[in-house]
Amino acid sequence: MRELFDDELKKLHGRFVEMGLNISEQIYSSTKAFMEHNKKLAQEVIDADNETNGEEMRLEKQALSLIALQQPVATDFRVIISILKASSDLERIGDHAVSIARETIRVKGNPRIPEVEKEIAKMTDQVRDMLEKALDAYSKSDADAAKSLTNEDVAVDEQYLLIRDAITKAVAENTETATASSSYFMVIRLLERIGHHIVNLAEWIVYSAAGQIVELNPGKANPELVNKLYSEEIVKEKGKDSKPDHTRKD
């Protein structure tokens, strides 16, 4: 009986990692389509979203079946719950990749800013590297590696601020880039949100590997940066006395 459970749990692990790798590829394809103005590739990313949603549903069904039929011990139950929670973050990352692909279709043909697109490509590499490190930490049950992703997310936030300022400057110099710039703002915001979801993913990896419920809020690593990142949004939405919440599940 235990051997059967271990075999099914191994399959669940494999399905989760496969889902993560597929979503990493979606991030790459969506931003590649955006940079290259490739409407066809963007549409392929959009069309593949149903498969991503299906992967999450199949993974969830398998996990719940393990809980219901095999009655796992506490340690195994913790692992299964972590997979269920983390898969939800993976699915949201996939949704953000689709949103980037949709921006590709919307912005196609408008004057572009090559320097900004170069920096967006760098930001894409950063978040994909984060995701792949998270999946590696998951595969190795490495809680310390998962915790280190906080610093990676701070670097993504720094890149977001750099690009945001570059876009603002470019529009001031050439108003014809305004339409493209609105898409740039959208894309970097989506990439930044992907970074947040990877941090959420890292928290579940720590819980699965070490049984610890941790808060990996990058605001603790660099509060000045995070306050700068969210100050305008928080003031607008909640008032000047509010504090930024870097752990939103958007």
Image (spheres, rainbow, N blue to C red):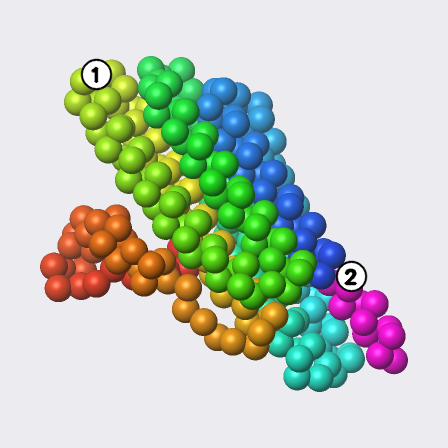
In the rendered structure, find residue 66 and report the number of the disc placed on it.
none
Mark 2 belongs to which amino acid? Lys
Helix, strand or loop for disc 2: helix
Residue 30 screen position, x and y as percent: 52, 33
Q: Which residues are magenta?
A: 1-12
Above/below status of 168 relative to 2: above
Mark 1 belongs to which amino acid? Asn
* Quadrant of res 107: top left
Residue wearing tag 2: 11
* Quadrant of res 170: top left
* Quadrant of res 238: bottom left
- Whether residue 123 appears in magenta in the rendering, the answer is no
Residue wearing tag 1: 174
Residue 93 screen position, x and y as percent: 51, 49
CA–CA distance between discs 1 and 2? Answer: 54 Å
Residue 110 screen position, x and y as percent: 35, 17
Q: Residue at x 58, y 26 (%)?
A: 41
Mark 1 Cα-neighbour bin, 10 Å: few <14, some 14–19, many ≥20? few
Residue 128 screen position, x and y as percent: 53, 42
Q: Main secondary structure of the magenta part?
A: helix
Q: Residue at x 53, y 60 (%)?
A: 146
Precedes in sequence: disc 1 or disc 2: 2
Comparing 101 with 24, the one in front is 24
